[in-house]
Image: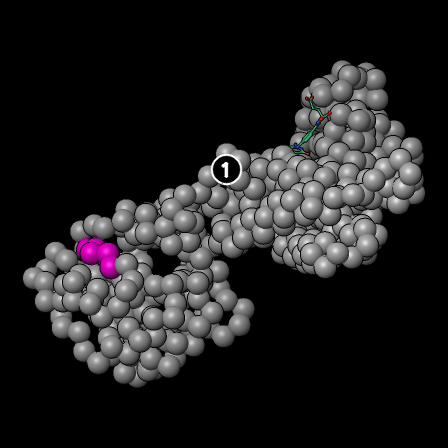
Amino acid sequence: MKTDTIAAISTAMTASGIGIVRMSGSEVFTIIDRVYQSKGKKKKLSQVPTHTIHYGYIMDGDEMIDEVLVMVMRAPRSFTSEDTIEINCHGGVYAMKRILETVIKNGARPAEPGEFTKRAFLNGRMDLSQAEAVIDVINAKNEYALKSSVSQLRGSVMQAIKEIREQIIYHIAFIESALDDPEHISLEGYGGELQQVNNKLIGKLEKLIASSEDGKMMKEGIRTVIVGKPNAGKSSLLNVLVGEDRAIVTDIAGTTRDILEETIQIHGISLNIIDTAGIRSTEDVVEKIGVSRAKDYAKDADLIIYVVDSSTELDENDSEIIEMLRSKKAIILLNKTDLQMITSEEMLKERIDKPVIPVSAKENKGIDLLELTLKEMFFHGEISFNDEVYITNIRHKTALADALSSLRQVRESIEMGMPEDFYSIDLMSAYEELGGIIGESVGEDLVNEIFSKFCMGK
Ligand SMILES: Nc1nc2c(c(=O)[nH]1)N(C=O)[C@@H](CNc1ccc(C(=O)N[C@@H](CCC(=O)O)C(=O)O)cc1)CN2
Ligand SMILES: Nc1nc2c(ncn2[C@@H]2O[C@H](COP(=O)(O)OP(=O)(O)OP(=O)(O)O)[C@@H](O)[C@H]2O)c(=O)[nH]1
Ligand SMILES: [K+]
């Protein structure tokens, strides 16, 4: 099949050690033969075997642009399943752009964002859930996000969906053939049998949908607000937490309001700590801004970390904060335990049923217990990737929910003793809704929308 040849810079558009210009399509060999020159000037890359690497130069006519290594991958043994060439050049922005320009001048066209992966999908190398995992791998910011997206990339979601669909289609086929041929295939007692299977499938869908809670936390991190009276040690604690994994700390300047979101990693779990410039710079957090302001920030949070100075007494400000915590997931960090204790763990536990962790920001103590508590609170104590499939994609979750309601409809129809063709209508809806996840009979608009969110060159 003839396809036009696409080209893009696949590495970041900043100066770096090495840059990659990638090409895929029917004409890559014609194009590379025009622009590549080997050291001895004899070698034609159209003649070399697949998965080989070649040293040489990229030429724009007589002009040498850069010294490069070129990788050759022949169809169908490539990421896109098409003939693919990757030019590894020096990672200067200008050098990369010049090479891209040259291959375009010689017959390639600029790729759209995500177009390489889109081709991999359209050529059947991966299903839609795997293609979507590619972007999740790129965006993964912690260990669990990476693990769950690589597992999806390797087909875990696709596999789970396919197994469920196979069972559904089997029963649709059975009902249809029995209805076509009532003399030979009896539907006597079939409702009861289908009900059992259907209940199992409902259970599976429910489990997958439930996994999306964990999945979302893994992928996006836990939205966290730190509250506490002035001088409780919030900044000190944040510094200690940040210090846990300094290399992966990121500062993301918020686009709305003056919110600063800082992501910290606690053994692979991301906490997106929402901090406000306003609150930070005010001397008297609780008094001046009031609990109501803190409540505003806490409203959308997945977690509130309440820092208490154990060397002082609890006062009415603490009482207000404690009230605010009741309806939320919250962890109390009892700080400054290196000092003489006035407020104890027990005193807090009497007032509210939330985990209290004694810590000392000064001496860097108690942070491990925080990690365990987080795991318990958000991941039911364990995060395993052995047989578990995590749904991290909202599109998948929506499709699963739609399929679930179709299967519940089947259950109801069986309970009400409706005729069998009613079952097969709803089974078919579930089948199709699940098919959307893996990209079966999805519209072109949806496919375009999904891939348009990818980066350039992917
Ligand atoms: N340079 C480079 N690095 C990359 C990619 C890429 O496209 N280029 N990838 C893009 O995301 C990822 C790797 N994904 C890839 C998937 C399949 C094939 C491939 O050539 N598959 C062949 C050969 C397999 C084999 O020889 O065993 C095949 O499956 O037939 C290459 C990369 C990450 N790193
Ligand atoms: N002894 C001891 N002192 C601590 C500890 N944690 C923080 N401090 C001290 O307490 C004071 C206040 O700490 P901060 O981290 O600035 O407190 P904060 O809650 O951010 O204060 P505001 O920014 O005013 O809200 C500083 O002098 C810290 O050095 C601790 O664990 N032990
Ligand atoms: K301070």
Q: Residue at x 50, y 67 (%)?
A: 254
Element type at mark 1: loop
Residue 378 placement, left or right of 74? left
Range of residues picked out in magenta: 356-360
Question: On the image, numbered disc 1 is attached to which residue?
Answer: 385
Residue 400 placement, left or right of 211? right
For badge 1, the amino acid type reads Phe
- In the picture, the quarter occupied by the C terminus is top right
The x and y percentages for residue 145 are 51, 46
Is residue 213 magenta-colored? Answer: no
Q: Residue at x 20, y 56 (%)?
A: 358
On the image, which quarter does residue 336 sit in? bottom left
Q: Residue at x 54, y 68 (%)?
A: 255
Residue 204 placement, left or right of 54? left
- In the picture, the quarter occupied by the N terminus is top right
| Any part of residue 429 in sight | no
The x and y percentages for residue 231 are 21, 70
The way the protein has been coloured in the rendering is one colour
Q: Residue at x 17, y 74 (%)?
A: 314
Residue 288 placement, left or right of 137? left
Camera-side residue: 144 or 97? 144
